[in-house]
Image (spheres, helix red, strand yellow):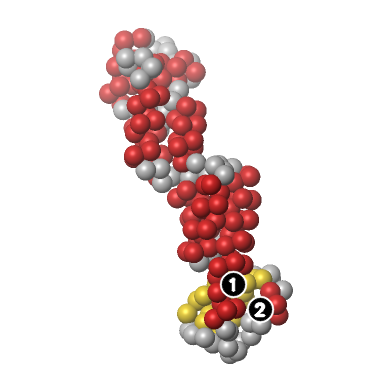
Amino acid sequence: MIVSDILELDKKRSKVFIDGEFAFVMYKGEFREYGIKLEAEISDETYETIISLLLPKRATKRAMNLLQKRDYTEAKLREKLSEGLYPQEAIDAAIEYVKSYHYLDDERYARDYITYHMPTKSKNRIVQDLSNKGIKKDILIPILEELYEDEDLDPEASQIEALLQKKHYSKDLEYKEQQKIIAFILRRGFSLEKIKSVINFSY
């Protein structure tokens, strides 16, 4: 294996190409430690050490730092690590590590998200949001069924009513102001038909 190219990524890191293909990113201080030089041969042992030890350790540290700042789904954390140009093996190792300690838990993420947004977002909007974040339906559906079974017979009507009260909706408002409030509720995933039915029933 020959180091065919080294391209600076930023002031601290460079992309290393082996036999004409991108291999990994290394910090400049590591080049001497691992003997990485342009057009120099890299041994199988050195390559394996970088791929199997150095990069997984670094990816895991990066994953931990990200999770300290905010919660992620597995899909979004994988996406974030991919942006750092970590190889798939390193990403898999990092994900396995943080999942083993429950720092990363899609079920917990979905439960917390649903609980927090139930009062203000429609069920369909919550499903769409979590699907976009990479939560799989086999995780999502049971939690939805559990959390919504204790709700009112028509939970969306209650949610819309709460939003209308929050925005001080009244039929005495000017038409333009009424439409602004309705648009606000529409953006939370509720249907226009459902909003109108609540307004007609309650106001």
Residue drawn at 48 percent across, 84 percent down: 20
- Residue type highlighted by circle 2: Tyr
Residue in the foreground of this view, choosing between 166 and 41:
41
**Apparent side of residue 89 relative to residue 14 in the rendered image (left or right):** left
- Regarding residue 66, the answer to whether it shows in the image is yes
Vertical arrangement, residue 153 with respect to residue 114, above or below: above
Vertical arrangement, residue 39 with respect to residue 131, above or below: below
Q: Residues within 10 Å of mark 1 (few under 14, many from 20)?
A: some
Vertical arrangement, residue 166 with respect to residue 100, above or below: above
Residue drawn at 55 percent across, 52 percent down: 97
Q: Could you say where residue 70 lies in the image, as x and y percent from the top left?
A: 59, 42
Q: For numbered disc 1, what is the local secondary structure?
A: helix
Query: Which residue in the structure is indicated by mark 1?
Result: 50
Query: Which residue in the structure is indicated by mark 2?
Result: 34
Residue in the foreground of this view, choosing between 183 and 20:
20
- Residue type highlighted by circle 1: Ile
Residue drawn at 50 percent across, 28 percent down: 116
